[in-house]
Amino acid sequence: MRLVYHLIVLALAAHTAWYLFREKDFWKQAGAALVLILFLLRLVLVK
Amino acid sequence: MSIRRTSPFILSALTLVVCFFSGREFLAMRAADEIRPGPGLTAARRLSDYFPPLKGTPGDTPVYVFQGPAAGGSVLVVGGTHPNEPAGTIAAVVLAENIRTAKGKVLIIPWANASGFTHSDPQEASPQRYEISTPGGRRSFRLGARVTNPVHQWPDPTIYVNPGGQKLAGIESRNLNRAYPGKPDGSLTERVAFAIMALIKAEGVVLGIDLHESAPEYPVINAIVFHENGADLAATAQMSLQAEGYDFRLEASPPNLRGLSHREWGDAAGIMAVLLETANASHGRLKGRPSAALVVDGQDKFYEKAAKLGRLFVPFGPAGIPLDERVARHLAGVSALLEALAEIAPAKAVSVENIPAAPAVLTQGLGAFLRPPD
Amino acid sequence: MSEPLVLLVMVGAFAGLTLRFKLPLGVALALAAAAGALAGGQGLALRHLVEGAFGFFDIILILASAMIFMKVLEESGTLDALAAAILRTFRRSRTGLLLTLMLLMMFPGMITGSSLAAALSTGPIVAPVLLKLGLPRARTAAFVALGAVLGMIAPPVNILVMIMGAGVDMPYVGLTLPLLIISVPVAVFTALWIGRGRMRIPPLDELKTLLPGASPSFKLYLPLLLVPALMILENIHPRGLPGLGLPVIFLAGSLVGAVCGRRFNILKATQRAVEQAMPILSILAGVGMFIQVMTLTGARGWTVLAFLSLPPALLFAGLAVGLPLFGGISAFGSASVLGVPFLLALVNRNALITAAALSALAGLGDLVPPAAMAARFSAQVSGEESLAPVLRACAGPALALLAWSLVVLLASPILERIL
């Protein structure tokens, strides 16, 4: 199950990064960056 | 290139920078604390020696064995079931660094939930470490989280049904003191619980002591929580503690509260199981700024005010409740329980020398009973 | 800087950034948290900001996957089909229709203990039905939001009570009746109150035009059956499944939905779902940071103590205001931070009834800004652009829930004897 969750987070991180680059509004990009921090740190199993 | 075009790159770089610096701090918690067991140590084992599948997992943790020359019973002392309750761990470390066993055997686990020591509870803003001064320098210890690190046990179920069949909020699946008697093929936390049960059975433990702390606003505090198997023992110990000036409440382990050490150690292994609680301001909800000083000195202006309002279950003055005092209580409790065991079951008595006396800990400070760092 | 001043800086920064500079809520919360850390003399406290956000990591995963599920249902045509089917079945009884929709709305919350799961899983089914009946968008959203909150409170699973129980070592046993007493009367009232006034049930031939193409095949409903089935299975037989968790359940439903209905591009749909979820995901991250800095600077302790310092006569007023207000940051946070001390302060009363009532008050927080999670999502599934009209429409039933919870709390000595 842990592997499944790892894949889910990987997919969400990819989507979030994609959103960050497509979104025009700077502050919305910043909001996505906040979320991306969480996905990345869990992805590498640091936090 | 306009700002609009470059901002995603800037933000991505910033994201990586934040990940790097915060990640470095998070990872700093992974290094284990030092312990220097005294000359009374007869064997240094790992919990995985009792349950090999635990080997190499973040749940494996040291077990220190103090075997006396004369035959007697076996006693287990557990600290760090909840890594955010430091008096339990420090009392176990102080015991391991000082005691000699004359009769019977003492087993000490200072960091029962080893994984819980590798992270901090979100939104509790706890310091990662605190220091205790010894005559030869300062010793640093980790203050962990109440539960297993989610990195080691992920994901949480929506609802956790523990081995005793109790339904709990999902996060409790990582609470060692809800996971007893554990499961050999369960989650990491359940496997740790299972390994501790295996140790209890393999070592023929007769008395298990689980050292905890609770928030000053919590009713079960300065207490001995006992399984009915240990009712006489707890009552005897309480009387002698009272005579020494230590007020301990007696709390019977509720039979419908499953998964806790004082319930399942008794039910599943038939031993006398007790849990000791002291009052720790640093993990209460009323605390002011959390800090290493709050952990060690135990002073807090909000708790002082709450005491005046009658909201607490312990007295709380300007001097607070320092770690010295909390550890001293635990040591007094352990001593009294060992004496009570000798009285109630002489054949199973465990005789231990050199347990630091509570008054000495109070006057000389904890550091006097910890070995200096390298 | 003293604790109340730090809190003032944080709230002030948040208000200024959102009202004056129109920053998104998530970013504003994060910046307000950083300002609080600086004002509290803690520097930037990077570790604390990130750690706080992780407090909602699991909820972020649930939300993101539920949004994907919702998008899939929309794209595959399942939602339209089901809305039409419900309308056809309950053509003759409006009360029956409203009560059925309320139960449907509450159901995922009852099973998962999460209002978001409800708003996101059956919200998209219930909302179109109400809209087709001619209910305004804001009132539709209010129906969905209150159903979600009531579902979170209703038994068998109430995570808010579990959180409070964990703080006082109260086992989660014997709560079914108290929770039913709290939730059922308000649910009936809410359904009938929001559904009051003129409502038009479309005639049968008009319904036919609502149906997607030919009569819908059974396959279309598979994802809708699978998700609650897995939720129930996990609840009644938790050891049978390898702890799937809500994110996997929602994504399993999405996969089934992607192959069972109208064909669509799943990657694009997922992208759009993440896009729509992003503001709320960043609010959650920001709220987590905000709470951690409140704790870090002592502002949390000050807040809890301020409520506990109230004289006994005002204690009930304090909890009636404090729990929903803090719930506006996070309902779960409110149950943990304020619910536990309040439960301890009322220790001489029946703990089960008290915890049930306190959970309802904390749960109400999901309708209170700044986060207003349930209301925000309900607005989204109902196609209502702004939050304010939804909150206005929620006000009546929300106040009813507040009042009823207080009545139950005050009457707990009497109720205890009856139960």
Image (spheres, coloured by chain):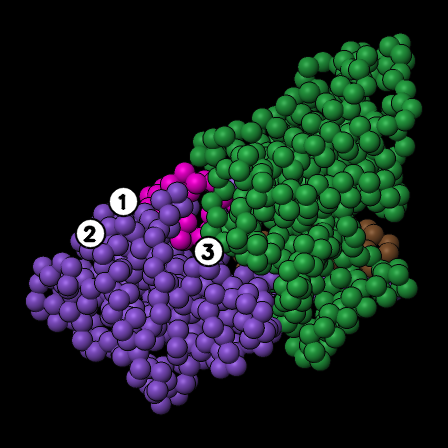
Chain colours: A brown, B purple, C green
Q: Secondary structure at mark 1?
A: helix
Are discs 3 and 1 both within one chain?
Answer: yes
Do residues under tags 3 and 1 come within 8 Å of each other at their CB atoms? no
Q: Which residue is mark 2?
A: B202
- C59 left or right of B312? right
Query: Is B167 within the magenta?
Result: yes
Q: Secondary structure at mark 2?
A: helix
Q: Residue furthest left?
A: B70
| Rendered view: C111 above or below B290 | above
Do residues under tags 2 and 3 come within 8 Å of each other at their CB atoms? no
**Mark on residue B148?**
3
Choose top left, top right, bottom left or bottom right for residue B42.
Answer: bottom left
Q: Nearer the viewer, residue C194 or B76?
A: C194
* Residue drawn where x is 76% and y is 62% of the image: C29
* Residue drawn where x is 51% and y is 70% of the image: B281
- C417 left or right of C294? left
Q: What is the CA distance from the residue labelled 3 to the residue labelled 1?
A: 23 Å
Q: Amino acid at mark 3?
A: Thr
Do residues under tags 2 and 1 come within 8 Å of each other at their CB atoms? no
| Rendered view: B222 above or below C383 | below
Q: Nearer the viewer, residue B146 or C164?
A: C164
Q: Residue furthest bottom?
A: B135
The image position of residue B30, as x and y in percent, is 46, 66
Q: Residues within 10 Å of mark 1 (few under 14, many from 20)?
A: few
Residue C57 visible = no
Q: Amino acid at mark 2?
A: Ala
Q: What is the CA distance from the residue labelled 2 to the residue labelled 1?
A: 13 Å
* Pointer 3 chain: B
Q: Residues within 10 Å of mark 2 (few under 14, many from 20)?
A: few
Q: Which residues are magenta?
A: B161-185
Number of numbered labels in the structure image = 3
Choose top left, top right, bottom left or bottom right for residue C32.
Answer: bottom right
